[in-house]
Image (cartoon, helix red, strand yellow):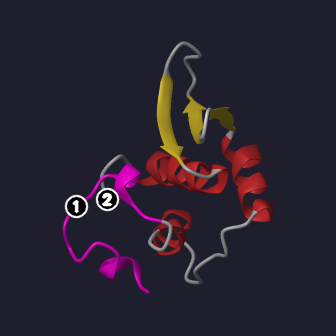
């Protein structure tokens, strides 16, 4: 699946991406040609490199990035799984809230 056919040409919010769409969009955000496998090895590296924080709230996970000003969250994504929340947070940080 290529990045261009993930959403069939219309803009959508990162929060609306489903699990099947995430790898192709992540490849674009990472500027790599090969679609990465979404696993903890990759997500651990994203957390460390991008300074992403992860918290669990009841049955959902929230990943967020706090920018240079520690009083404001610059990017925040919530998902059913921790991996999805981390990947969506990274995508929004790199590509913006709408892609």
Q: Which mark is residue 93?
A: none
Q: Is residue 15 located in the magenta-colored stretch of the structure?
A: yes
Q: Where the N terminus falls, by quadrant?
A: bottom left
Q: Where the C terminus falls, by quadrant?
A: bottom left
Q: Is residue 38 located in the magenta-colored stretch of the structure?
A: no
Residue at 51%, 52% (x, y): give it.
Answer: 88
Judged from this view, the residue extending furthest toward the bottom is: 1
Judged from this view, the residue extending furthest toward the top is: 71
Residue at 35%, 46% (x, y): give it.
Answer: 97
Quick one: label 2 or label 1, which is nearer the N terminus?
1
Percent coordinates x, y for residue 65 in the rendering: 58, 34
- The reply to whether dot 2 and dot 1 touch (C-beta < 8 Å) is yes
Counting the numbered discs, the total is: 2
Which residue in the protein does label 2 denote?
Answer: 99
Q: Mark 2: few, some, or many residues within 10 Å (few <14, many ≥20)?
A: some
Q: Is residue 90 above or below residue 26?
A: above
Percent coordinates x, y for residue 54 in the rendering: 67, 37
Q: Between residues 8 and 68, which one lies in front from this camera angle?
A: 8
Q: Which mark is residue 11?
A: 1
**Magenta segment range?**
1-18
State the predominant SS element of the stretch in magenta.
loop
Dot 2: what SS? loop
Judged from this view, the residue extending furthest toward the front is: 59
Dot 1: what SS? loop
Q: Is residue 73 above or below residue 5?
A: above
Residue at 57%, 49% (x, y): give it.
Answer: 85
12 displayed left or right of 87: left
Label 2 vs label 1: CA separation?
A: 5 Å
């Amino acid at each position: 699946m290529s990045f261009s056919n993930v959403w069939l040409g219309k803009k959508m919010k990162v929060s609306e991406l489903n699990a099947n769409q995430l790898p192709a969009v992540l490849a674009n955000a990472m500027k790599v040609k090969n679609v990465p496998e979404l696993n903890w090895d990759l997500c651990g590296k994203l957390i460390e490199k991008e300074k992403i924080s992860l918290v669990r709230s009841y049955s959902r996970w929230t990943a967020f990035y706090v920018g240079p000003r520690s009083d404001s969250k610059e990017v925040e994504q919530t998902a059913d799984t921790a991996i999805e929340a981390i990947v969506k947070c990274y995508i929004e940080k790199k590509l913006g809230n709408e892609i």
